[in-house]
Amino acid sequence: MDDLMKDDCCAPKGDFDLAVIGAGSAGFSAAITAAEGGKRVALIGHGTIGGTCVNVGCVPSKTMIRAAEALHGAQTAHRFPGLNGEAQVADWSALVAAKDDLVATLRQKKYADLLPGYDGVTYLDEGPARLVEGGVEIGGRKITAPKVIVATGGRPAVPDIPGILDAPTLDSTSLLELDRLPESLIFLGGGYIGVELAQMMARMSTRVTIVCRSRLLPRAEPEVSRALAEVLRAEGLTILDGVTYDAARRDGDRAVLTVTVDGNVHDLTADHLVLTTGRAPNTEGLGLAEMGIETDRRGAIKVGDDMATTRPGIYAAGDVTDRDQFVYMAAYGAKLASRNAVLGGAERYDNAAMPWVVFTDPQVAGVGLTEAQARAAGHDVKTSVLTLDNVPRALAARDTRGLIKLVADRATDRLLGGVIMAPEGADSVQTLVLALKFGMTTKALGETIFPYLTTVEGLKLAAQTFDKDVAKLSCCAG
């Protein structure tokens, strides 16, 4: 029976065994997976090869964020007695050029240069692709393939605000392409992208205002949102939360945003409005409706846990879907889609131990359920919150901005989730990921040996905080 099923789902038909639309992280992951399994793959370009992450997302933003951290580090050296430092942006255009050079290098090395190493992959970049019966139409010709994976990614969304199209606006892409450093910016949205880029630009000496409908990082724990707001305000950013966006307009070369805060109407003015209110899937022109492929209210493709769409034989992965919008989850989902589509797999998407990171300073990183999510799921919840002034590493670094929050089931003591806000939070969260993945209890985490004077030791201390006051422990006594 297994052999018959495998032959039925994987028998070569037509030009290729699999067509993949989109040559970003998800598209490459799908194509490489199928090629390594001996399948013939048509990898169809959709935009610049490499996709969002390397071209306009993770790589360019994080190198600019790190540059801003270096700048800020020199300016705050005085937190150590006896030190003083100064730094400033000497040549913004040179910084942007270095970012562009890094992007070009990684795009070539990690994408374009990989293609010759996979004989089973044929790269096609002949124009927009459209789904048709039996395959994909591109450049006026049909590429025949019994299975297709859509991985066309996403783009910054434009909020529905009257006059927004007439005002001077930027998005996360064009912000990092400016040829001069702006004097002032208003960021619309306090999500991951908004807070990262807003802090980065403020550290580059731009006057920054963040306006958001709810609060900063609305999906994170409220303790983290409050702590991050305090950090950003201390650095000189203006934060207006709980606002209503009323209208936007151009006033000469400037942008004006009208908002309502606590019942009062305000006109905010800056060089540009930066639109960081979310992302939209790239689904236009694909012929989804004609193929019977369902989308959600954002226009994202609905997929099951097997990454299949509502049209048999067509799968989707990455930012074009209704799944997690992280590059590593895009690649993961695409690998599952490829295995299930042409390699006889029966794998299921699992994000229960999926880490996420916000590259502010301090960084915010988490995994699993928040307290609210755990309660909604029916758990009898217990939590611990540890501020960084209880973590020796933070004290030695003279930087106690941040906290750690753990969420656990009261009856079983099993960890359900957690978040760490700390300068090295991104590199510490993986320990918590493994703890959740392998079902650790708070007691087991608290009894695990951690190296002293590390940020990750804070997880041990946070676990011990469920049962004791760690402020009363000597170093390493726990």
Image: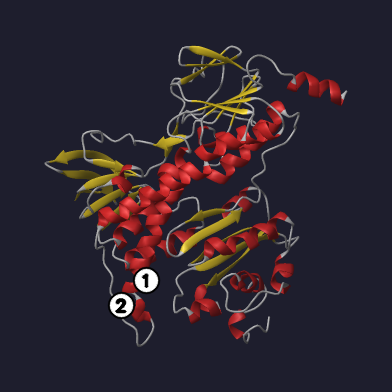
Left or right relative to 228: residue 431: right
**Does 390 appear above or below 439?**
below
Q: Is residue 238 visible?
A: no
Q: Horizontal and vertical percent for residue 195? A: 39, 54
- Viewer-proximal residue among 366 and 467: 366
Q: What amino acid is labelled 2 in the image?
A: Gly
> What is the number of the mark on residue 434?
none
- Viewer-proximal residue among 351 and 98: 98
Q: What amino acid is labelled 1 in the image?
A: Gly
Q: Which element carries disc 1, helix, strand or loop?
A: helix
Instruction: Residue at 44%, 59% (x, y): give it.
Output: 225
Q: Are marks 1 and 2 in contact (CB under 8 Å)?
A: yes
Which image quarter: residue 11?
top right
Q: Residues within 10 Å of mark 1 (few under 14, many from 20)?
A: some
Which quadrant, please, contains the N terminus? top right
Looking at the image, the residue that sits furthest to the right is 1
Instruction: Residue at 35%, 59% (x, y): give it.
Output: 199
- Viewer-proximal residue among 376 and 123: 123
Q: Pointer 2: what residue?
A: 85
Q: Horizontal and vertical percent for residue 186? A: 27, 50
Give the mark, 1 or 2, whose residue is nearer the N terminus: 1
Q: Horizontal and vertical percent for residue 453? A: 57, 78
Q: Pointer 1: what residue?
A: 73
Q: Which element carries disc 2, helix, strand or loop?
A: loop
Q: Residues within 10 Å of mark 2 (few under 14, many from 20)?
A: few
